[in-house]
Image (spheres, rainbow, N blue to C red):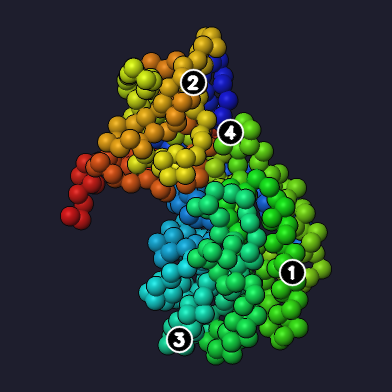
Amino acid sequence: MAYSYQENELHCDGVALADIAAKAGTPCYIYSAVDIVERYRAYDQAFGDVPHQICYAVKANSNVSILRLLAEEGSGFDIVSGGELFRTLAARADPARIVFSGVGKRVEEIEYALARKIHTFNCESEAELELINETAGRHGVKARVALRVNPDVDAATHPYISTGLREHKFGVDISEVEGVYARANRLPHLAVEGVSCHIGSQLLDIRPVMETVDKMLALVARLRSNGVAIQHLDLGGGLGVSYKPSDKAPCISGTVGAMREKVRGHDLLVKLEPGRSIVGDSGVLLTRVLYRKQTPRKEFVVVDAAMNDLLRPALYQSHHEIQPVRKPANEDTLLADIVGPVCETGDFLARNRQIAPAQPGDLLAINTAGAYGFVLSSNYNSRPRVAEVLVENGGWRIVRQRETYEDLIRGE
């Protein structure tokens, strides 16, 4: 466990969070390198001798130092934009281990990816297949593609991060996909080599995952019998993490082990695209209490972090455990809303939460913030984006500098 109390002070891998706050300031994101590497290795090792590639989903946390950490482990990467491709290349990732997903790839992004010789485009429509074929032909190359299949499986997750049902914008419906593959297979500048899917994120029940694996393997068999030379199967990502004590996150090794036994013997390179389950638990958002405010209806704890720093509670009504950096002497609690300085009623990090009775100047750690934290942050209310810190090798370093006021108007 990366975060624990030592002598009543919260530490990350032996480093006191209060020491980081004193030098790096607050708010700031803190990540455990050890935790990230251990979770990546859990995925990689669970496949055993089955040919596989773990392609970390860059959208979960795209800090270049984290990408480099994973690249050094041999990770591949799942990207959804030209900017994410730029980041992975800056982290010295192997382009041959990069897959490009997403429903709205622009021509210039496709050209950029072709020039860098990425492994595969995960295509989401016939129109995209035709555009990639035309673009590849214009540049005298052949593009490897997989078609993202919408398997019509209910992921049983938040509706904003569920992607595998017929009403979602992602992929091609499984009832239509064989015809699309047949037409794509005739396009001269495409190498139609893969099948891809992804049913959603923050999955706590693995039964929909296993149902999807079965559907995809059956589809691969049908495509091969129709003359489409499928070589790889991309099963997406989506395993969840425990945001609150009642959440039971799936075991990475157990889930992958069950997948491994299903795909064994099918002569496929299997790809997975985990993001949240690799970085989510590694991170906290460190914030300092500014004020206590009592109204006739409730009490507020006002902190220096806000919805522009961590959007998930406002966007998804998501839960993040909050704990004091200095462990209190007793078990007294306070019922309060934990809110930030942004001028929105929706600027909250927790509502009606029982927390330790925090006082102005106290530090709080907002847990499980390593995924979809900083990447969703903004400069709303002209607030500079916060620093990011990586704890590794018994020490820590700033891996993204805190923005300044001058940064706010750069380019204007």
Task: Give the SS element for disc 4.
Answer: loop
The dot on residue 141 is: none
Mark before the other along the chain sequence, 4 or 2 = 4
User: Mark 1 sits on what residue?
Assistant: 217
In the picture, the quarter occupied by the C terminus is bottom left
Q: CA distance from mark 4 to mark 1?
A: 34 Å
For the residue carrying disc 2, how many other residues have a C-alpha within 10 Å: few (<14), some (14-19), or many (20+)?
many
Disc 3 residue type (three-letter): Glu
**For the residue marked with disc 1, what is the amino acid?**
Leu
Q: Residue tagged by mark 2?
A: 355
Q: Amino acid at mark 2?
A: Ile
For the residues carrying marks 3 and 1, which lies nearer the camera in this image?
1
**Which residue lies at the image location 51% right of the left edge and 36% below the top edge?**
319
Neighbor class of circle 1 (other Cα within 10 Å; few <14, some 14-19, many 20+) is some
Q: Disc 2 to disc 1, how far (Cα)?
A: 48 Å
User: In x, y percent, where is residue 31?
Assistant: 50, 38
Q: Position of residue 275 (x, y in %)?
A: 56, 51
The mark tally for this picture is 4
User: Mark 3 highlights which residue?
Assistant: 134
Q: Earlier in the sequence, mark 4 or mark 1?
A: 1
Determine whether 96 is above or below 276 in the image.
below
Distance from disc 4 to disc 2, alpha carbons, whole Å, reads 14 Å
139 in relation to 331, above or below: below
**Residue at 55% over, 15% down:** 7
Disc with the residue nearer the chain's start (3 vs 2)? 3
Residue 17 in view (yes/no)? no
